[in-house]
Image (cartoon, grey):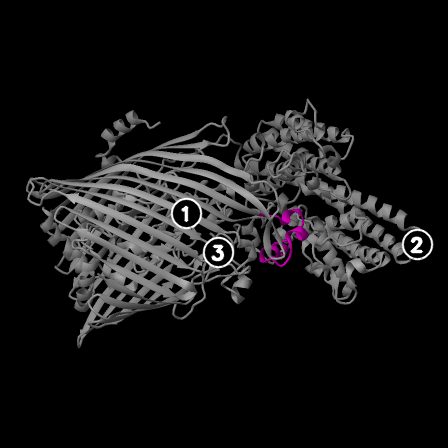
Amino acid sequence: MFNWKRSSVIISASVFLLTACGGGGSSSSDTNNNPTPDAELTAQQQALTDIANAVIPVLQNSNTQALSLANAIDAYCDEVAVSSANVASTLATAQSTWQAAMTAWQQAEVMNFGPSFDGGNNSIRERIYSWPAKSSCFVDGALVDYDDDTAGFDINSQTPRRIGLDALEYLLYSNDLDHTCSTDSSTTSPTNGAWNIRTDADRSLARCEYAKIVANDVAAQTTALLDDWQGAGDNYFQQLSTAGSTSSRYSSATEALNEISDALFYLDTEVKDMKIAEPAGISADCASTSCPETVESTYANQSLANIKANLQGFLAVLNNGMDDLLEDAGQGNIASTMTTDINAAIANIDNFGTTLVASVTGINEADCTNSTSDNRLEEACALHADVKKVTDVLKTDFVTALTLAIPQSAEGDND
Amino acid sequence: MKIKLLHLALAAPLAFCISPLSHAQSENEASLSTEEAVASSSITSVKREDIYITGGATQIKKQPGSAHLIDQNDIEKFEYDDINRVLSHIPGVNIQEEEGYGLRPNIGLRGAHPHRSRKIALMEDAVLIGPAPYSAPAAYYFPMFAKMEGIEVFKGPSAIKYGPNTVGGAVNMVTRSVPEEDGGRLNIAYGTDAYSKAHLFYGQRTDTWGWLVDGINLQTDGFKDLDTGNDTGFNKSDITLKGLINSDISADIYQQLEVKIQYSDEDSDSTYLGVTEEDFQDTPYRRYAASDRDHMDAEHKQLMLTHYIELDPTLSLTTIVYRNEFERLWSKLNGFDTNTSLSEIFANPNQGINVDFIQVLRGEINSSDLGPDGTLIVGNNDREYVSQGIQFLAHWDPMLLGVAHEFEFGFRLHNDYIERNHTTDSFLMTNGELISDGAATVATTTNKDSTDAIAIHVQDKIRIGDWTLTGGARAEFIDTVRKDRSSSNADDISNEDTVLIPGLGAFYQLTPELGLLAGVYKGFSPVGPGQNDDIDPEESINYEAGFRYYEGAFNTELVGFYNDYSNIKGVCTFSSGCADADIDKEFNGGAAEILGAEITLGYSLQHNDLSYPFKLNYTYTQAKFAESFGSTNPDWGVGDIKSGDPLPYIPEHQASFSTGIVGKSWQNHLIVKYVGERNDTANTNVSPSNRTIDGYIVVDLKSNYKVSKDLHIHASLRNALNKVYVTSLRPFGDRPGIPRQVQVGMKYNF
């Protein structure tokens, strides 16, 4: 409703008062009751150092597991090449090693800042694990290319969909040897002919050989990432711990903290919205009651383990540096609340009782809507509520207490 | 002032235009134009000063502010349909071309961001013509330029007479008026890419009434090559009816009432999708298969009632009641069903997973092969706009204390709104074609933004000796509301803005040929509906100073300007690369500085019954942020912007030059336009990283031949050198300017 009274008063008072007009918006000086700049910087740098010290073991573990995976696939391929009786057992070993490698990496998924993030859509992270960008058809195409010209094949020039842990999941878990492309064009080898008419043995070996070089690449990427963090010279650990003073990368410690905070929002946009809400039908991106086909791990059924690892990774950063900053800001209860909620979510995953895809298949829509952390009518929807508890605090109290920004990708509220 | 006096006073400016643009016309041109003026009925009985912001061409020379008028002679000489090409003749105008035909112009003045002309007061016949100028200032509707008989651009202090956006200035387009004598014209043309124009108008006039009908159809198959082979052009029609009655010229109180009814529609296959930089080198006019469903369907209706009353020779009042309705459904590719935006993909098309996405856009691989994120989302941005109100403009020209005053008082009560009913459909690229994936249509944005606004302006112009002084102020009282129509529980978001915008200008006639001008005024652009409380209005203090010189066939003008922004504002639009959820979101950019200089030169050489007109204008603009801040606005780039970074899409240098040879029955003209290099974003550290867009020169040729008094033949060669150039990288990829176009046509007066 238009405020006529206000307008008429202002009209009469102001139209002819030209000299009284200011030239722009008012500005106010900040009142700052924060600690002295030096003390604040020291505290932030200490927090960044603590965070770095929490991230490095995760990356080390990821590297160790990736190297083991490469060895396991190598052993598997040796058996496939001779069609030995050990093919099944070595495949099982390769699969379990892949699970360990994936779990290790999923902790690092919420630590996607610095060297793993550099390079945008061709970053180390994307080369290790490009989900949600994954394509079995592209993997099929790449392995045909590799099989056709092994010597000329350059793993470094492959786009992320063709490589990484997501490609390995398909290569190790898919039992159907036919290609998954809608046409034959991308899976026809000039030398070896169309993929689908080749023998099973031939195709199994080709898949395995391709998995081997992909696993080697994953191992190489995790090694490179670790080296970026702690290698000789001006490594990323140094950059973080000196942010705002001698760091050439970060002109302020807040800038570095913002990058880390942005990475933590993986829990909101990727875990809550994509890994849980979409399969459970909570998200508008799912046009049906539920969308089981959109679970993260479609071949290995490791979606819940991945989410659990994401929560553990988040907890590692929260409780190694961020908590101290919150404490300094007089908001230590934020860290403790988030920790409690994360541990509760992890416990609920441990007690889930089935896979995520089974849980969301045939979901009851009304029960899902009514599910909460305390009223677990549909377990997947309750898990969504568990995680949302954490991300609600992340998006509000957490960033406010630390004067950090919400990343643009998380600004559109999907809740 | 009765009607005959009006004729005398108003015919002259249009027949003998003396703006810097038209001042240098030869007598031959004037002669030809006068004939055409009769046929085209350029004289109106409505007091021109109330339609022309500048007060008409005669007033421009002494305006205490920068003002330009392109009159009917210039418009007809160049036979332009595209306002972008018309405005390139005026210094200080920043144009960002888009789809090549000028369907959706992007006009900025003096460094104001040109995108969707949202920073200027855009008017038709002195009435705001944007679909919802307060609630949604991005002008997705633009009138067909072919029906205009004049256009003025005002950048100085008098721009405060027209709001709400005064920061950049004002553009007013004047439609064809009811003729003074019975008559009409048929203008038809045909050209490249099955371009055709059919324009017919006819009107009658008596002493006490008159009417006009003016209809146009423009269409083309388009110059882009869609991978699917489908058309990329448009079909646009407009019809305007005008009728007027007026009192007897001997009446003590003269009155006139005019009604204007307009309808137009547009059916265009425009797209926002460009191509990668690499593809642009080889196939600049290619359109990827993924844009096959892109289509605009729009309809515009207008009703205007204009009443003019002259109570005595010094006191007159013009009242205009107006209502504009605009509906559009723009279906266009939004992107992939993933968190990687098309902007990111086109920013680095050779990087990582972007390579795969580009292949799908080209139709080279199927969506199903890419994986779950290969599904393409086509957004249907269905919007309805209404803009309506009543405005009064009173002129009172008394002698007070021995000084001649020209008081002007304006009042406008305005309401506008936009209803958004945005949905998306999902498609799969399958063997080079977009096929529905069968999923139901999804509603994305369902809201309504509305604004009630009162605007008042007062101005007094006094002349003391050789001085002309103008002082005035504008007050705006703006109430905005955003209503989320998708939920009955959602709270409305309301905002109130009140602003006072003062302005002062001075003109000093130093010699009969040379005049000096200076002015200062406040620039303002309001906060739109639904914005967060921390969003501030755009405000600036704008200064200008310069001179005008007229001597015989020579004229020149130099004006320097400095716009000191306390807060420059950015707005997210889909066309600038924003996600659907962020559309119309506003951003503070803090302090900014825009300074520059505008130069015009005109001369006409007469020799052996031939004249050789020459016109040049040049604009220098330095536009930069004046404080460092973290930007979340994709228009500027997301990331850290430093003080001193350039404002995107404002070229430092731009110029246009025209010359010709004019005989008694023929004219040949050459027009050269130069736009300097521009920045896509503020710097290379933001996302998308800045890419400098190369400058370009485009040459147009135009010929007219008068077969008989009433029959003229015209031909044009646009982009005669077939220059390939990038107009914009927004929203997605490199977008080309229009290639060489040949057009021939004829005009027949009857």
Residue occupying the point 63% across, 57% down: B431
Mark pair 2, 3: CA separation: 57 Å
Mark pair 3, 1: CA separation: 25 Å
Q: Nearer the viewer, mark 2 or mark 1?
A: 1
Q: Report the residue marked by disc 1.
A: B298
Chain at tag 3: B
Q: Nearer the viewer, residue B416 or B398?
A: B416
Q: Report the residue marked by disc 3.
A: B729
- Bin the neighbour count of mark 3 within 10 Å (Cα to Cα): few under 14, some 14-19, many 20 and up: many
Secondary structure under the numbered disc 2 in the rendered image? loop
Instruction: State the mark number for residue A84.
Output: 2
Secondary structure under the numbered disc 3 in the rendered image? loop
Residue B726 in view (yes/no):
yes
Secondary structure under the numbered disc 1 in the rendered image? strand
Query: Going by the image, does B365 lie left or right of B51?
Result: right
* The quadrant where residue B610 appears: bottom left
Give the main secondary structure, helix, strand or loop, of the magenta stretch: helix
Query: Going by the image, does B243 lie left or right of B5?
Result: right
Mark pair 2, 1: CA separation: 69 Å
In the rendering, at what x and y percent does residue B621 appear? 35, 56
In the rendering, at what x and y percent does residue B444 appear? 53, 38
Q: Is residue A293 above or below residue B492?
A: below
Residue B372 falls inside the magenta stretch:
yes
Residue A181 falls inside the magenta stretch:
no
Q: Give the range drawn in magenta.
A: B353-376
At label 1, the amino acid type is Ala
Badges 2 and 1: C-beta atoms under 8 Å apart? no
